[in-house]
Amino acid sequence: MTNTNNNVLLDLQIQIPIDIPLDIKNILIKNIGSVQKKFLDILYDKIYDDNTGFIYGFSNNSDNNNDNQFWIKIGRTKREDPHCRVDEWKGNIEFCQKTKHNKKLERLVHLLFNYANQVRVFNDCNQVEWFYFQEYTNIVNIISILNRYLEIFMNNNKNKIDDENDKFCENNKIDDNDNGKIYNNKINNNKCKICSKQFEHILQL
């Protein structure tokens, strides 16, 4: 369908594959059709040099967050301790999720929550990758489900992605016995955990 006044192609919601978990689908359909399509495209995209790392979320002390309205910045790091990255932003880490597909998962998360994406201004500088949720949203659980789905998807679709992508899937396995370190705030490397009492009731698994 085309708008004849300005020839802008209208965004329409697309058919989402039935194998995507319902929790993910319910969030994905909050976005416009072009974002939904990009999300699905990224699943099959070749992402070179992808490897093990963390998806993390943090807030600022000045954020007046509550159950139904809260700010959170979502990013990624390859460092062994995600606190080091968050400390550079002078933020309060709220959760982290260890993943074998660090870059791809971050892109998928940003697209999934695109409807809540906001640019924030601090000290006259724009900061991206911030999200403002205006309803109860268990983002920790959603990211954990997405991470598990991505792992299954990558294992089941290696031939469809291509030989190069197959290589990075095989070369970035996490040892099943590697439970990682337990940090000061009791974040387990392999699971989403909440380290802020302020977010405990919002982002509870």
Image (cartoon, rainbow, N blue to C red):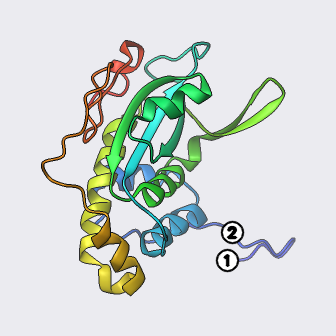
User: Residue 19: x and y, percent?
Assistant: 27, 67
Q: Quadrant of the N terminus?
A: bottom right
Using the image, tell me which numbered label, if any, was put on residue 133: none
Residue furthest toward the right?
5
Q: Which residue lies under the disc numbered 1?
A: 1
Judge the density around disc 2: few (<14), some (14-19), many (≥20) Cα neighbours within 10 Å: few
Where is 75 relative to 66, above or below? below
C-beta proximity under 8 Å, tags 1 and 2: yes
Give the percent coordinates (x, y) of residue 81: 40, 35
What's the residue type where badge 1 is placed? Met
Q: Nearest the camera: 132 or 7?
A: 132
Q: Is residue 192 visible?
A: yes
Q: Residue furthest left?
A: 177
Q: Count the marks: how many? A: 2
Q: In the displayed structure, would residue 203 be above or below residue 130?
A: above
Find numbered disc 2 in the image and state the secondary structure of the residue it sits on. Answer: loop
* Residue 10: image tag: 2
Asked if residue 13 can be seen in this view, the reply is no
The correct choice, above or below, for 117 with respect to 102 in the image is: above
Residue type, mark 2 in image: Leu
Identified at 38% across, 40% down, the residue is 80
Say which quarter of the image contains residue 18: bottom left
* Horizontal side of residue 153 vs 13, given as left or right: left
**Up/down of 170 relative to 127, above or below:** below
Question: How many angstroms separate mark 1 from mark 2 (CA)?
Answer: 6 Å
Q: Measuring 35% from the left and 21% from the top, which residue is drawn there? A: 195
Q: Secondary structure at mark 1?
A: loop
Marked residue nearer the N-terminal end (1 or 2): 1
